[in-house]
Image (tube, rainbow, N blue to C red):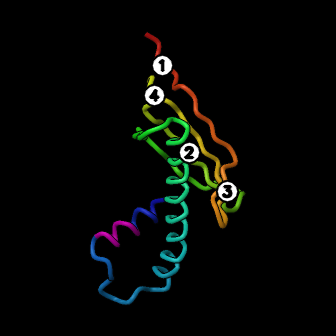
Amino acid sequence: MKRGIWLAACLAAGGALASPPSHVQADLVAETTPDLVAAEQARLTCLQFLHVRLGGKIAPISMETRPVPHREQQWLVDGNVKGPEGPLLFACHLQQGARWELLNFSLWAAPTPPA
């Protein structure tokens, strides 16, 4: 993920590089760009399921998107969201293809700290 952050920082800072990119830089861009796009698509797809399940507009408190190890084109999106009755935890397991497929969706109340 650090490479993705580096790429985003480079693109935001100046767009084009002053010198022609090296083979290493070209490989880095080719390797991370599809992953960044797929991660963002997975995040947005999971947000759609959250909107449907909770109704209305929601604001995630935190959200993490990552590929599932050893499973090509599968993504896990999880985090916290503020629900109508308090904080909720959620997780989406998605399969990337011509259309995104929801393999599993979980939503449960966040544990409250003891008083």
Q: CA distance from mark 3 to mark 1?
A: 32 Å
Residue positioned 50% across, 75% down in the render: 28
**Residue contact at pointers 2 and 4, CB within 8 angstroms:** no
Q: Nearer the viewer, mark 3 or mark 1?
A: 3
Q: From the top left corner, tell me how far across and down residue 68 is, in percent.
A: 65, 53
Residue to which mark 2 is pinned: 49
Residue positioned 34% across, 71% down in the render: 10
Residue count near mark 3 (Cα–Cα under 10 Å), binned few <14, some 14–19, many ≥20: many
Would you place residue 56 above or below residue 70 in this image? above
Residue to which mark 3 is pinned: 95
Q: CA distance from mark 1 to mark 2?
A: 24 Å
Would you place residue 61 above or below residue 41 in this image? above
Residue to which mark 1 is pinned: 112
Check residue 84 for magenta coloring: no
- Does label 1 or label 2 sit earlier along the sequence? 2
Q: From the top left corner, tell me how far across and down residue 2 is, in percent.
A: 45, 60
Would you place residue 14 above or below residue 50 in this image? below
Answer left or right for 12 relative to 94: left
Q: Nearer the viewer, mark 1 or mark 4?
A: 4
Answer left or right for 79 relative to 20: right
- Does label 3 or label 1 sit earlier along the sequence? 3
Q: CA distance from mark 3 to mark 4?
A: 27 Å
- Does label 2 or label 4 sit earlier along the sequence? 2
Q: Nearer the viewer, residue 1 or 83?
A: 83
**Residue contact at pointers 3 and 2, CB within 8 angstroms:** no
Span of residues in magenta: 7-12
